[in-house]
Amino acid sequence: MEKIGKYEVVRELGSGATSTVYLATDPFNGQQVAVKLFDLGILRDPSRAKVYRKLLMTEASLAGKLSHPHIAKILDAVMEGDVNYVVMEYVEGSTLEQYAEVDKLLPISTIAEIAYKCCKALEYAQHQGVIHRDIKPANILLRGETDIKISDFGAAALMGSQSTQVSGVGSPAYMSPEQVREARLTHQTDIYSLGVVMYRLLTGKLPFDASNNHSMIYHIINIDPPPPSTFRPEIPAEMDRIVRRAMEKDTAKRYQAWDEFASDLAGFSTQIVPSTSEIMDTEKFDTLRNLAFFRNFSDVELWEVLRISVWRKVPESEYILRDGESGRTFYILAQGTVRVAKQGRLLSLLRSGDCFGEMAHLLDRDFKRSTDVIAKDDAVLIEINPDVLTHATSGCRFQFSDAFLRMLVKRLSVANTRLSHLLADQGQTE
């Protein structure tokens, strides 16, 4: 096959029961894409055509709707007679399936970070009115060590719409109790499925040992699985607890919201990862979300900040900027305190959430620093190169401009207050 619609086929990437995925090129912009071509034989089968066409329509309806760094974008969709395909962002890498085997398990800390990113992506999808309904390792793409993209939203339910409710979709081993009962579904069904994914990635085993789908469904509804540490003793008790809560059969006992799930994963990551120069993305994201500078940034924009920034730990008394040196990089203080000084005289103290070095960026030229900035104690810096920021999305750039404006207004207010006090003191001495 040389072409699918306007897309030039490069090679086959993989195939399943209902579709084949090809790597292709969009001739108009040269972009590589993944084209999922639905099996025409199945679509013509009267007993199954209605279900699969509805799944394809669901995925097609999401084109342009979900824009998140951890969700594979749906770029285009065509349903014209015998030609039925969806065009997706191409993600170079593999699915998590290969890491769901006993001899290829990922580190526990890596699994926690991957699950955290899945939580944030699925929370975003929920806010867009989308429930995935088929979360499993094969539908989570991994690029690099922890950069993930959730794909295959064909089974998704669009909240508020009954047109996409299709029974019998999803993968039985990863289905929630309410899903196998064909009850009304909420985002908590995806929470349950992600819990099963974590169980499989942690142990290389499914939580229920069943010989067929009927037995699997019985176990999902009636049997509590052994904790993951049964099969991998080094798994901490806290991770057992997180997985167990995600997989609670009673939705009242299960995580009620994605941010609860993500918060527990972030707390676990902070406890288990030894103190090194590396800062994990879970900690970075939670830090950004709690800093005043980033209070108006959306989650999607915060993930973009992670992509364009460099984070580093600075020991006590280290010079970060020196008076008279040139540079355009600016910094946001993530943790700790820094001293701003001129010729050894303390001018101010900056704390978490404060920004410094931004004048060079605002003036849009190389700039000689006018003060020394020194770490008062151990600190964590978020370092941003203005040249990299120019390539960020317009929304992200706007949020930086808005944050700078708020910061400048705050500084002017503080300066006016100090000037008023100074003038009042002078008046009293005259």
Image (spheres, helix red, strand yellow):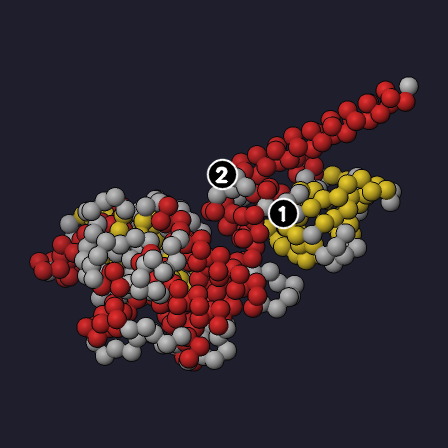
Q: Is residue 285 visible?
A: yes
Q: Please tell me the numbered disc located at residue 190.
A: none
Q: Please tell me the numbered disc located at residue 395.
A: 2
Residue under the point 24% across and 50% down: 58
35 on left or right of 265: left
Marked residue nearer the N-terminal end (2 or 1): 1
Amino acid, disc 1: Ile
| Residue 52 picture quarter | bottom left
* Residue closest to the eye, 297 or 369: 297
- Label 1 sits on residue: 384
Residue under the point 46% across and 62% down: 114
Residue sticking out furthest to the right: 430
Residue 96 at x, y = what percent?
A: 39, 67
Residue 332 at x, y = what percent?
A: 65, 46
Of the 4 image quadrants, the one containing the N terminus is bottom left
Residue 107 at x, y = what percent?
A: 50, 72
